[in-house]
């Protein structure tokens, strides 16, 4: 890393620490305002993270709501020791795992209204239509959730093994193993799909 | 002289540092001069280094190290081993190459925001809770549970009479017999669908299922609990102990006691409620024998979180009960001597007679106060357009407001109670006698039943209703106040309610059906013409029968009043194979493609049609107690559930089951019949548990129903009727012709509908247990339903209803 890059990273880290401290202070004043701030700052990251884990836009929507509702309830426990985003990821990870364990049998589907019927316009839902790197998305959603979580936190946020271990509430060794398995699964499945679709 | 080379032994010893110092100097000197020995030595050094290297690992063992190495999360030793492996392993090199692009591929996935639905939900939480902060005195806002999907209307009722020892009587401020005990004995928590019932003598709170009254759990609170309130925000049930001035908190999520606080108020606490705007606890108190000119009672506002007393308002008359209106703008402070109508700052707006209870109308600004008048009761109304006071026989006991703007009153006739339904216009609509004489009242809109809770005991019965006889039908205002423009709850001038009875309800079409009823022979069967409507499908929802006619038009027939309402047409080209109702929805489902047509029964309008794309023909449908539609498929083991509020579908894999028929019991459990595998099963959506029992029957399942005793009734194409309890099926009837349908009567008992035996035209209906001889109608009957007083309605697809007076009796 160049020295310019390093100082930019330190500055960003410092800014984030300051922002987190302000948020914790705000939470003591008004949990509602703190929730609004956290939500507007991190909703897309949390939603995208959950979407990658579940590959289910509506489920990810519902879990995003759960995550921020839980965060709201737990705002009082947040101290200046905490970094807000990893804390949110930890809630999101636990929520997703709970959801997947409990709801293995369920899948929510959006039902389309037939054209020209009814009176209430449906809110447009474009989530399912956004084109993505299908293969990456598909493989991610088929990995064991512990592995995909570790991989996403590492790839998206650049968290260290130690940070990921704190979020996942496991040992650094476990994180190491999860990441390796996730990567290898990717490599294997890439190979398989390439073999199936030689073009 | 030829060069003397260093021997192999010497080279090796040099490498190992084992040569003598002199020999080593000589050897090193030689190596600088001799290319041959120098290269030999270099080889030995490399060999030695090779030998010092860690052993070569298998790919699987080294993958983790390679992966961590990529992230700079390895120790140096590990890294060396990995590099060494990598040098020799093409496969692992390929892995590493593939991995290196992965992080950027993941990072390249778009970042997406959640939907606006979630934005709304979170901002609602963030903003609503702003009012959390301590604020100056706020209104005693509604404790009433008017959640968007709430199915219950609850009241704060009161009881009294020193003759009822089980009620916790409180000392009267005036020294007279207290007729206001202000016992709030029952609260409904919509968040966990649980009714909490106070058991005073048992010092406990029972958590019960509102559909079945089944006890979920009993929570001991100790002391002498006197009243209940619900803190919806915190999801806690508050239990007041007047004697100890203590509030015990029950966490509704775990149904356990999580804390108890002594409230520092003067006087004796007499009632408790929670202000949802501020989330504060509101406690009324009374003072024993107050000195002249001093206050007799107060309203104390306590912070829910800190349990600190925020404000106390003193009153010359001790309020025994605080009844808030739905908007939290006004409250009625009820005491034996007078009822004070106050605004949100406790300024007295109006003084009304004292009483045992008060209730705000759900459809207007009216307030009703239930008081005693000698040995009888009087209901006094106040409001912009208030009806005249209504006298009722019997001692006053409890009062609640009904969703249609009317009220329900419980009086004590001495040994028996009477529940009267009072219209918005202040007239008695109907009455029913009950065994209980006192208690708190709760009304369940979905089942049209009321419950009297008294000291832990619950008595549930159908609402008093009547089918007006032909000549008097017009005297009764329509029950469909929801469609009436006079239904505005605002305080702005509204149309005179008294004028309403003569004007037909907006949606009513044609003359009252009962007015045109013609008596048929034999038996007490009437024919009700439907003005050209030929019912093809009929589904019952409360007192209404929802009809789909020959031209796909929806109408609704009120079995209590005889009124017929035009709702509108389904979408052009809709094909309906199943027609079911429940919650506050009616559904028409196309079996071929799973298209669902939805009618909102509460708003009396057609919501729309939805393509569910279930990919297999639909084989069965049923509506849950929450109004969701359950769909079984012919060719797949999936059970789908459609939520009309969110328009989302969920699926449940019943692993291998093929659903031929569906029905749902009062607790929301799904029962299904699988003819292919010869089983019947249940699926409980709350626990996701599936239970299946083998049950062989002849023929295919054509009708399925769970009665009020939780017995499953199975009717078949070959005419057998079986009752199934536990894992045991019993054949109760053999009709030798297909069972068309089952319907519950007014008491929840199952009745069947089937064609008359060959050679006779018409249809028969009778109890599925065969306990009574079947009744019959002479023509075709498409459906069978019962109203609240047990009259049977059978739809004749040629254009009318048969109404059997004997019906279910």
Image (cartoon, rainbow, N blue to C red):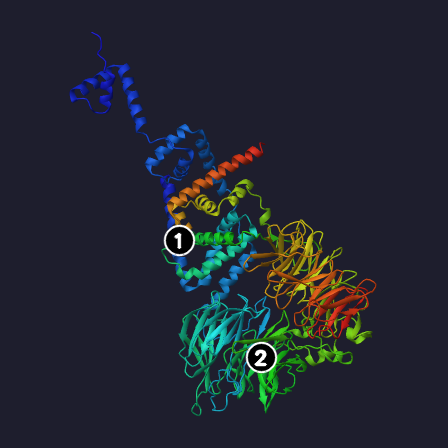
The residue sitting at 22% across, 22% down in the picture is B14
Please state the chain letter of the residue tagged with numbered disc 1 in the rendered image: A
Q: Do we see residue B279 in this rendering?
A: no
Q: Do we see residue A11 in this rendering?
A: yes
Instruction: Looking at the picture, tell me which residue is in the foreground, B341 or B766.
Output: B766
Instruction: Looking at the picture, tell me which residue is in the foreground, B594 or B331.
Output: B594
Mark 1: few/some/many CA within 10 Å (<14, 14-19, 20+):
some
> Is A76 drawn above or below residue B53 in the view shown?
below
Q: Residue furthest top?
A: B1
Quadrant in which the N terminus of chain A is drawn: top left
Mark 2: few/some/many CA within 10 Å (<14, 14-19, 20+):
many
Give the SS element for disc 2.
strand
> Is A3 drawn above or below residue B367 in the view shown?
above
Quadrant in which the C terminus of chain A is drawn: top right
Q: Position of residue B758 (x, y in %)?
A: 81, 62
Q: Position of residue B304 (x, y in %)?
A: 44, 71
The residue sitting at 39% across, 50% down in the picture is A166
Give the SS element for disc 1.
loop
Q: Nearer the viewer, mark 1 or mark 2?
A: 2
The residue sitting at 50% across, 85% down in the picture is B165
In the image, B20: left or right of B474?
left
In the image, B424: left or right of B529?
left
């Amino acid at each position: 890393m160049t020295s310019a890059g390093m100082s930019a990273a330190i500055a960003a880290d410092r800014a984030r620490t300051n922002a987190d401290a302000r948020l914790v202070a705000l939470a003591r004043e008004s949990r509602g305002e703190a929730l609004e701030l956290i939500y507007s700052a991190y909703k897309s990251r949390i939603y995208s993270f959950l979407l990658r884990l579940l590959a289910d836009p509506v489920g990810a929507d519902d879990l995003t709501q759960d995550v921020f509702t839980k965060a709201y309830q737990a705002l009082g426990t947040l101290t200046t020791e905490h970094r807000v985003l990893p804390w949110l990821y930890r809630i999101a990870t636990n929520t997703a795992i709970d959801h997947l364990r409990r709801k293995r049998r369920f899948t929510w589907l959006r039902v389309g209204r037939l054209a020209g019927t009814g009176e209430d316009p449906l809110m447009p839902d474009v989530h399912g239509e956004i084109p993505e790197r299908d293969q990456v998305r598909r493989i991610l959603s088929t990995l064991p959730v512990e592995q995909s979580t570790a991989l996403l936190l590492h790839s998206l946020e650049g968290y260290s093994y130690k940070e990921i271990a704190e979020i996942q509430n496991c040992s650094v060794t476990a994180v190491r193993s999860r990441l390796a398995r996730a990567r290898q699964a990717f490599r294997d499945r890439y190979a398989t799909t390439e073999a199936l679709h030689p073009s | 002289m030829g060069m003397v080379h260093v021997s192999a032994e010497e080279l090796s010893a040099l490498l190992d540092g084992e040569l003598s110092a002199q020999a080593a100097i000589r050897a090193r000197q030689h190596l600088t001069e001799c290319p041959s020995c120098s290269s030999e030595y270099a080889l030995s050094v490399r060999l030695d280094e090779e030998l010092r290297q860690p052993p070569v690992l298998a790919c699987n063992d080294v993958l983790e190290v390679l992966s961590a190495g990529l992230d700079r999360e390895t120790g140096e030793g590990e890294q060396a081993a990995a590099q060494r492996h990598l040098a020799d392993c093409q496969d692992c090199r390929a892995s590493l190459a593939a991995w290196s692009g992965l992080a950027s591929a993941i990072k390249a996935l778009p970042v997406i925001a959640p939907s606006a639905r979630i934005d709304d939900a979170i901002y609602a939480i963030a903003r609503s809770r702003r009012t959390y902060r301590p604020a100056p005195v706020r209104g005693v806002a509604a404790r009433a549970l008017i959640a968007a999907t709430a199915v219950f209307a609850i009241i704060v009722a009161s009881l009294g009479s020193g003759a009822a020892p089980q009620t916790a009587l409180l000392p009267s401020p005036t020294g007279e017999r207290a007729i206001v005990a202000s016992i709030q004995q029952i609260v409904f928590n919509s968040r966990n669908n649980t009714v909490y019932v106070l058991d005073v003598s048992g010092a406990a709170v029972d958590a019960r299922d509102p559909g079945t009254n089944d006890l979920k759990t009993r929570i001991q609170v100790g002391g002498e609990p006197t009243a209940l309130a619900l803190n919806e925000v915190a999801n806690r049930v508050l239990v007041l102990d007047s004697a100890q001035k203590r509030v015990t908190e029950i966490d509704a999520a775990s149904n356990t006691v999580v804390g108890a606080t002594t409230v520092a108020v003067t006087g004796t606490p007499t009632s408790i409620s929670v202000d949802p705007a501020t989330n504060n606890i509101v406690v009324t108190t009374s003072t024993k024998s107050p000195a002249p000119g001093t206050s007799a009672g107060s309203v104390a506002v306590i912070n829910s979180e800190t349990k600190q007393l925020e404000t106390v308002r003193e009153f010359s008359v001790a309020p025994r009960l605080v009844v808030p209106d739905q908007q939290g703008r006004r409250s009625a402070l009820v005491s034996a001597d007078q009822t004070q109508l106050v605004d949100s700052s406790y300024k007295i707006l109006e003084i009304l007679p004292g009483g045992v209870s008060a209730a705000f109308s759900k459809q207007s600004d009216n307030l009703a106060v239930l008081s005693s008048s000698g040995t009888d009761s009087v209901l006094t109304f106040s409001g912009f357009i208030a009806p005249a006071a209504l006298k009722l026989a019997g001692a006053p006991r409890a009062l609640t407001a009904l969703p249609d703007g009317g009220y329900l009153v419980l009086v004590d006739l001495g040994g028996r109670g009477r529940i009267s339904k009072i219209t918005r216009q202040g007239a008695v609509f109907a009455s029913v006698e009950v065994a209980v004489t006192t208690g708190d009242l709760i009304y369940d809109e979905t089942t049209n039943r009321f419950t009297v809770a008294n000291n832990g005991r619950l008595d549930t019965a159908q609402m008093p209703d009547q089918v007006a006889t032909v000549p008097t039908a017009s005297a009764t205002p329509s029950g469909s106040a929801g469609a009436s423009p006079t239904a505005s709850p605002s305080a702005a001038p509204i149309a005179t309610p008294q004028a309403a009875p003569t004007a037909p309800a907006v949606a009513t079409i044609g003359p009252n059906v009962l007015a045109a009823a013609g008596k048929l022979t034999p038996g007490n069967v009437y024919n009700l013409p439907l003005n050209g409507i030929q019912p093809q499908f009929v589904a019952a929802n409360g007192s209404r029968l929802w009809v789909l006619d020959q031209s796909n038009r929806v109408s609704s027939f009120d079995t209590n009043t005889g009124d017929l309402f035009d709702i509108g047409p389904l979408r052009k080209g809709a094909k309906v194979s199943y027609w079911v109702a429940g919650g506050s929805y009616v559904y028409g489902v196309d079996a071929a493609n799973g298209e669902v047509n939805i009618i909102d029964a509460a708003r009396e309008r057609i919501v729309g049609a939805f393509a569910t794309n279930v990919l297999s023909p639909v084989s069965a449908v049923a509506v849950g107690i929450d109004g969701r539609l359950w769909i079984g498929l012919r060719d797949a083991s999936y059970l789908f559930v459609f939520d009309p509020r969110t328009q989302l579908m969920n699926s449940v894999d019943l692993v291998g089951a093929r659903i031929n028929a569906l029905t749902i019991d009062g607790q929301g459990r799904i029962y299904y019949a699988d003819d292919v595998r010869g089983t019947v099963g249940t699926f409980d959506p709350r626990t996701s548990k599936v239970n299946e029992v083998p049950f062989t029957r002849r023929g295919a399942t054509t009708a399925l129903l769970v009665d009020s005793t939780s017995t499953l009734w199975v009717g078949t194409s070959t005419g057998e009727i079986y009752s199934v309890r536990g894992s045991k099926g019993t054949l109760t009837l053999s009709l030798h012709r297909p069972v068309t349908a089952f319907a519950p009567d007014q008491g929840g008992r199952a009745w069947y509908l089937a064609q008359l035996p060959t050679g006779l035209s018409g249809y028969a209906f009778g109890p599925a247990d065969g306990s009574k001889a079947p009744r019959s109608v002479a023509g075709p009957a498409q459906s069978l339903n019962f109203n609240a007083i047990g009259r049977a309605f059978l739809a004749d697809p040629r254009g009318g209803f048969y109404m059997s007076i004997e019906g279910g009796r």
